[in-house]
C-alpha cells in the first residue's frame, strides 16, 4: 500500500520531462507514493476553459503535498500566471529557495550555501493592474490626484499596485527566522528599498526589525537595500546566509543566486503555507527545450529532496541529495549546462541524468 498521496502537476514546456525525472528518483528511494496527476496551463485551458481548473486546487488541498513542473505564462497579455494563482489560492505564503553550490559545478565561486525566503502572496505580484487608457485607470488617476495633489505622473500611464501588509511581512520574516533556527543558520538579512518606497518597503523593514527582536541572541539580523544586495551577492556571497524579501525582489534575487550556484538547472524551491506545501524548481518552462530531453532535471530532483524532508523522510532525502551530488561531482552523466563547453557532445539528456542519479542511489 502507498504511504503518501501526492499531487503531481507536470506543467508544460520542459515541465513533464523534469517532473518525470523527479518522480522516478523519488520512487527509487523506496518511498511509496500514490501519485494524483492533475493538469494546469495553456493546454488544459482549451479543454477546461481555465488554465487552473478547480480539480487542481482541490487535489492539492486534499493531499496537502504537491510537486509541480513549470507552467508557461503568456507575456504582456493573455491569462495570468497559474504559478502565482496557485500560491495565492492556497495561501502558500513562503517560497523557500536554497542555493547550494555542489562540488563539480563550474562557476566563479566555491562554498556557497544561501537560503532565499521570498514572500509569495502580495507586492507587485498581487495582480492589481490597470491598463493604459481604460476608464478604470482614468478614474484611479483622478482619485490619486485628489488624495495626493503633489502626485505628478503621466496621465496616460498604466498602473500596477504594490500592496505590502504588516501581517504578510510578519509571517514571512518569522518563517525566515524559524527556518534559520531549524537549519542551524547564523544570520537573516532583510532586503528592501525602504529609502525610496517609504510606505511599502518602509513597512516591510519596520516589521522585519520588530520580528528580529524576538530572536535576539539566537540569530543575527541585518538589512540591505536591494540594489546594494545584488552587488554584495556577486562580490561577497559567502557573507550572507538567509535572505528574506518581498515577492518581486525575491523573484529577482532567486535567479541571481541560482546563477551563483551553476544556473537555473540546479536551483530547487518550495512554496509553503500552513498545512499545504508545493514543491517546484526556480526555473520556468524553457519552451525552446520542450520535448528535447535536454533540460537539467537537478532542480526538480532537489525540489523532491525538499519534499522528502518536509514529509519526514529525511533518510531518503539525504540519500537522494547525495546521489545528485555524486553525479554532479563525477561530471560525466550530466546535462549540457553542467559541462564546461555547452556544446560538449558527451552531455546526456534529462532522462539519462535521472538514470545516473538512480544508479548512484543503489
Ligand atoms: P526559464 O527559467 O524557463 O528559462 C530561462 C533559460 O534558463 C532557458 O532558456 C535555459 O537556457 C535555462 N534553463 C531553465 N531551466 C533549465 C533547466 N532545467 N536545464 C537547463 N537550462 C535551463 O525562464 P523564462 O524563459 O523567463 O520563462 C519561460 C516561461 O516559464 C515563461 O512563460 C515564464 O512565465 C514561465 N515561468 C514559470 C515558472 C514556474 O512555473 N514556477 C517560473 C519561472 C518562469
Image (cartoon, grey):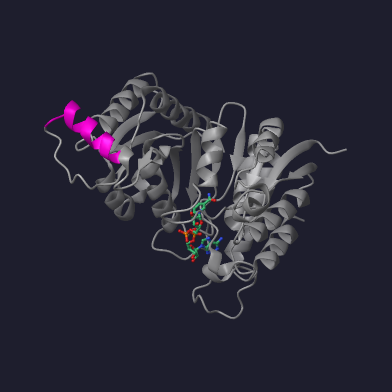
Query: In terms of depth relative to the viewer, which is nearer, 128 or 65?
Result: 128
Q: In this view, does 216 lie above or below 334?
A: above
- Find the magenta span and give its range: 137-149
Query: In terms of depth relative to the viewer, which is nearer, 282 or 15?
Result: 15
Give how far across and how far down residue 186 sits, in percent.
41, 34
Name the residue: 72% across, 40% down: 6
| Residue 262 seen | no
Locate the N terminus by quadrant. Answer: top right
| Residue 203 seen | yes
Query: In terms of depth relative to the viewer, which is nearer, 111 or 23?
Result: 23
Name the residue: 12% across, 30% down: 149
Give how far across and how far down residue 245 sits, in percent.
37, 38
Q: In this view, does 307 lie above or below 236?
A: above
Name the residue: 67% across, 36% down: 60
Q: Residue furthest left?
A: 150
Label count reads 0
Q: As drawn, is 65 to the left or to the right of 247? A: right
Whether the magenta-drawn stretch holds residue 77 is answered as no
Whether the magenta-drawn stretch holds residue 146 is answered as yes
Locate the C terminus by quadrant. Answer: bottom right
Residue 20 appears in which quarter of the rendering?
bottom right
Give how far across and how far down residue 260 sits, in percent.
41, 56
Residue 117 appears in which quarter of the rendering?
top left
Q: As drawn, is 154 to the left or to the right of 180? A: left
Q: Which residue lies furthest to the front in this view?
A: 135
- How would you classify the magenta stretch by its main secondary structure? helix
Q: Which residue lies furthest to the right in this view?
A: 1
Q: Residue furthest top?
A: 214
Q: As drawn, is 202 to the left or to the right of 5? A: left
Amino acid at each position: 500500500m502507498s504511504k503518501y498521496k501526492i499531487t503531481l502537476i507536470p506543467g508544460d514546456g520542459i515541465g513533464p520531462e523534469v517532473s518525470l525525472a523527479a518522480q522516478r528518483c523519488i520512487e527509487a528511494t523506496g518511498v511509496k507514493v500514490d501519485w494524483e496527476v492533475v493538469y494546469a496551463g495553456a493546454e488544459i485551458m482549451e479543454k477546461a476553459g481555465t488554465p487552473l481548473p478547480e480539480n487542481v486546487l482541490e487535489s492539492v488541498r486534499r493531499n496537502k503535498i504537491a510537486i509541480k513542473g513549470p507552467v508557461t505564462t503568456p507575456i504582456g497579455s493573455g491569462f495570468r500566471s497559474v504559478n502565482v494563482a496557485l500560491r495565492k489560492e492556497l495561501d502558500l505564503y513562503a517560497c523557500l529557495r536554497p542555493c547550494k553550490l555542489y562540488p563539480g559545478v563550474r562557476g566563479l565561486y566555491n562554498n556557497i550555501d544561501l537560503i532565499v525566503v521570498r514572500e509569495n502572496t502580495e507586492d507587485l505580484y498581487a495582480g492589481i493592474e490597470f491598463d493604459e487608457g481604460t476608464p478604470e485607470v482614468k478614474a484611479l488617476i483622478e482619485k490619486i490626484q485628489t488624495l495626493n495633489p503633489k502626485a505628478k505622473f503621466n496621465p496616460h500611464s498604466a498602473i500596477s499596485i504594490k500592496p505590502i501588509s504588516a501581517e504578510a511581512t510578519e509571517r514571512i520574516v518569522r518563517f525566515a527566522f524559524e527556518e534559520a533556527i531549524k537549519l542551524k543558520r547564523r544570520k537573516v538579512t532583510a532586503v528592501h528599498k525602504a529609502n525610496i518606497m517609504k510606505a511599502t518597503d518602509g513597512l516591510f523593514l519596520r516589521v522585519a526589525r520588530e520580528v528580529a527582536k524576538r530572536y535576539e541572541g539566537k540569530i543575527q539580523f541585518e538589512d540591505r537595500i536591494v540594489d546594494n544586495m545584488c552587488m554584495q551577492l556577486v562580490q561577497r556571497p559567502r557573507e550572507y546566509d538567509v535572505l528574506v524579501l518581498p515577492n518581486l525582489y525575491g523573484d529577482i534575487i532567486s535567479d541571481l543566486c541560482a546563477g551563483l550556484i551553476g544556473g537555473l538547472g540546479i536551483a530547487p524551491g518550495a512554496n509553503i503555507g500552513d498545512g499545504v506545501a508545493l514543491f517546484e524548481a526556480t526555473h520556468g518552462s524553457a519552451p525552446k527545450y520542450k520535448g528535447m530531453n535536454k533540460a537539467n532535471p537537478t532542480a526538480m530532483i532537489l525540489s523532491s529532496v525538499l519534499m522528502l524532508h518536509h514529509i519526514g523522510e529525511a533518510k531518503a532525502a539525504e540519500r537522494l541529495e547525495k546521489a545528485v551530488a555524486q553525479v554532479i561531482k563525477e561530471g560525466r552523466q550530466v546535462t549540457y549546462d553542467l559541462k564546461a563547453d555547452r556544446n560538449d557532445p558527451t552531455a546526456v539528456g534529462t532522462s539519462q541524468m535521472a538514470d545516473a542519479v538512480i544508479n548512484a542511489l543503489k
